[in-house]
Image (tube, helix red, strand yellow):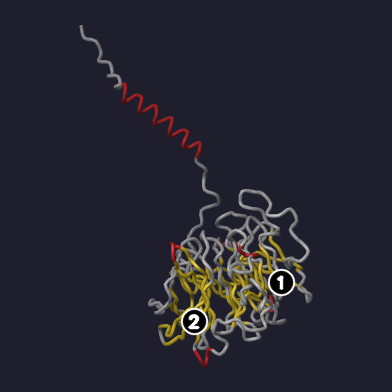
Amino acid sequence: MKFPMLPRPFPRSAAWFTVTLLFAMHYSAQGQQQPIGVPVPPLGAGPFVLDTAEQHKIRVTVVTKGLAHPWSLAFLPDGSMLITERPGRIRILRNGVLDPKPVSSVPEVRTKGNGGLMDVALHPRFAENHLVYLTYTKPVENDRGAPALARGRLDGGGLADVRDILVTDAREGNGGLSGRIAFGRDGMLYMATGGNVEKVAQEPGSLRGKILRVRDDGSAPPDNPFVGRAGYKPEIYTLGHRNSLGLMVHPDTGALWNNENGPNGGDEINIILPGRNYGWPVVSFGRDYPGPRISEHPTREGMESPLLVWLPSIAVSGMTVYTGDRFPKWKGNVFVGSMRTGEIPGTGHLERLVFNEKAEELRRESLLGELRQRIRDVRQGPDGFLYLLTDEDDGALLRIEPAQ
């Protein structure tokens, strides 16, 4: 008589391994969190026609793609454009076509954290001297980085006579590098340096967490507010800044404006006045990333209160005032790039701010949220259109035009 063959039992070691693996997979799945945010599809070819609150229909055209985390742009007198890429390249766009060959002789950059090649600005007399100014993270000893200002002469497809004209102090950590620059109506060059490292923004002997004011050769002018004051660096114009990613001269008033990233909330715009203290990290409207408030009182006597704050934060970046005729409903409005809203990835956009004649906010509008792009810079072009850079692996240059 034949009995049916019974299945062979697992060896003891195999059975124990299987049970252990199943338990491990279960508890691993329980412990894992889904990524925050929603999937962001690649930017399409465009153009995109979108509606807005006051100007109404606009068209967003993709001028070019293929940029690696572009950071800033500057228009040359012939209408072409310089675009910086954070990994350390300058690209030239001519007649809407991106030159595949980068500009030569750019300084070596350190790209750890949020460092790299950042802002670009032309000398006010660029047509005569061809001088270009760059901010970047300079690699220094012990694998650290120092925000630096370099100057070179644009000569064809390269830079000549490149040299550092200002190098700030290196600090431990990768945060708070920033590096926006702008020439004022006084002919001086203003440079924002990040101060998101301990209390460096309040240290008078450090150039970090400050807005600096220097001549076009990097030297401190004698009328700076702290010249001759014991313990203060002579280049300092203001102090108490966290991470300024927007800096501009207001075209109507000539005043210097900056914006800066708070931590979790507390992004702000400030009107910059000589010798003033803007509070970081003593006062802030934001919270630290784990949740606690930075300070119990967001304002304090002797420290400047912001012109405008964002709660939640929008990760502010480039900033400009629209002065052209292409968008008559936007004339005088301030535009600020956003890289994400409320700490949620995939929520970058362009912010439009309306002020009255006393620089008091009237209303604000979020634009281009449908594209889900990190907007790193915004500039008005000589043609009266707005140009934006998207801070992505495959970054793009966008142009905003009227759709009608």
Residue 47 position within the rendered picture, expressed as x and y whole percent measured from the top left: 53, 70
Residue 172 position within the rendered picture, expressed as x and y whole percent measured from the top left: 51, 60
- The secondary structure type at the circle numbered 2 is strand
The answer to whether residue 225 is left or right of residue 98 is right
Q: Residue at x 39, y 28 (%)?
A: 20
Q: Residue at x 75, y 72 (%)?
A: 355
Residue 400 seen: no
- The secondary structure type at the circle numbered 1 is loop
As drawn, the residue found furthest toward the front would be 230
Residue 42 seen: yes
Amino acid type, mark 2 = Arg
Residue 35 position within the rendered picture, expressed as x and y whole percent measured from the top left: 52, 48
Residue 191 position within the rendered picture, expressed as x and y whole percent measured from the top left: 59, 75
Q: Which residue is mark 1?
A: 276
Q: Which residue is mark 2?
A: 151
Q: Which mark is residue 180?
A: none
Amino acid type, mark 1 = Arg
Q: CA distance from mark 1 to mark 2?
A: 28 Å
Of residues 135 and 334, the one nearer the viewer is: 135
